[in-house]
Image (tube, rainbow, N blue to C red):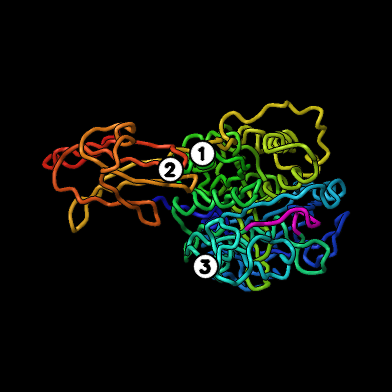
Amino acid sequence: MNKWILSGGLAAFLAAGLPWTASYGAPYAPGDPSFSEQWAFYNDGTFSIEEEKNRYAVYDDPFGQPWAPGDWHFEEPELLGMLVQVERIRAAAGIDVGMADAWASYGEGKRDVVVAVIDTGVDISHEDLAGAIWVNEDEIPGNGLDDDGNGYADDVNGWNFYHNNNQIYNGSEDSHGTHGAGTIRASSGNGVGISGMIPGDRVKLMPVKALGGGDGEGNTAALIKAIRYAEDNGASICNLSLTSPTNDQALYCAIRDSSMLFVAAAGNDGKDIDRTPVYPASYELDNVISAANISCGGELHESSNYGVGSVDLAAPGSYILSTTPGNTYSYMTGTSMAAPMVTGAAAMVWSHFEGIGAAEVKEILLNSVTPLDSLSGKVKTGGMLNVGAALRYDLGTLSGKAFEAGGHRPENGTAPHLEARTERTLAGLYLKVRVVDIDGDLDVLYYAPGERNAEWFREREDCQSFTVSDRDIAAFRIDQAGVYTFYARDRRGNDTAYTVRIADLREGPGVLDQ
């Protein structure tokens, strides 16, 4: 089904710039040796890119091999009879998220928050992620049993929906998820590596692997199951550093009917997604925050998508230093790096202010941005994430408005979603029926010839049943034109009937939803 692309993959390739080193004095240094290179947290304008002097690996593509420290350098363009000036990236003072002020306000937080990182996997053994990972206290490690009865055996730290097992780390293919995790929650002040945004132990990361392989791709079936797992197991915020050009209605319903706050990467095509939507960033749902990528100089990065109607704010996403597998650290670029900045800010706000929920967290983040001329007309707020201002927000000015479009889990669950399409193969013509049960409690699947409604199926127990694959698909060979109805019901009684018409095969097959 639909493929999902990580929003730091092509981004980092398109953004191929120069590796850098930085040395400057921040007003607050947490004691981590590479904090001075984290311009997104404190930027005094002295940061610049210098060829062949970087201390850490640079990923052009999170799924390729990184350039080793000191190896990667800018390739001079051919002059072709013209004088070409090589542009160097320069920083602008104040283009950061205000972490010094944020840490001064936050302390160690006031209440616990679980953040789901639905991505590739996460190297949970990384030296700088010690103590940051969510633990399922109701599961006994290694006994092969589903001790807590949630449907997943030995899910001690999360689940792998890409391979359908409890191995949430599978090696180098999980660099992307590990990088995002470090931005949010790498240990601060431990004398190792970098600083994550959130100090203390109040916020935990739940790794939920839904993407993988050499290209960091996945399918919607796994993504929807990952969302359901995260919410069912206590996550309040969900980071989605991924995009697809396909408007998948099943995913839309899964996000709409979740009580979690989602932070979505805007994507890396350099396009206006008001005109050319990407999802889930372009879903018109209240419980989604969409993030663009701003560079250290205060400009929207050339690869970043934008859209004054679809993208809420910008956050640092260019040459972000964070954790990568095997106790390493690397630079990556893309809206996949901007989204975890916003996710980390959301978790800090949620933990810091007692008595607020997802709607208030989003309102605080969007109302506390730093306005920038470069973002006017590009993102909805016209501004850049400012965590320090968010944590000083006057709660008395909150509107009190609840989410209207999305953000509410229906008390009786959501009816199964059905859709169908035809596909011609060497073996003939097939009708592929997709059944997505967002709640995970699918009970019966039936089909019958003719046009039927849900009530007709409820009154019968002798209908033809069918099953779906782990990607939620059932395939039916088509030998003749006709009308068929497919029916799905969950254990709560929510049901859906879906009728398709197969056109005259001589005129070419077609499917019509009734």
User: Alpha-carbon neighbours of circle 2 within 10 Å: few (<14), some, or many (≥20)?
Assistant: many
What residue does disc 3 label?
Answer: 64
Nearest to the observer: residue 277 or residue 55: 277
Residue assigned mark 2: 490
- Give how far apart the Cα atoms at labels 1 and 3 are: 41 Å
- The stretch in magenta equals 196-206
The residue depicted at 67 percent of the width and 48 percent of the height is: 343
Whichever of labels 1 and 3 marks the residue nearer the N terminus, that label is 3
User: What label does residue 413 carry, if any?
Assistant: 1
| Residue at image point 44% right, 51% down | 221
The amino acid on which the numbered mark 1 sits, given as a three-letter code, is Gly
Cα–Cα gap, marks 3 and 2: 42 Å
Q: Position of residue 480 (x, y in %)?
A: 13, 44
Mark earlier in primary sequence (3, 2): 3
Distance of mark 2 from mark 1, alpha carbons? Answer: 9 Å
Query: Does residue 425 show up magenta in the picture?
Result: no
Does the CB distance between marks 2 and 1 fall below 8 Å? yes
Image quadrant of residue 192?
bottom right
Quick one: SS at disc 1? loop
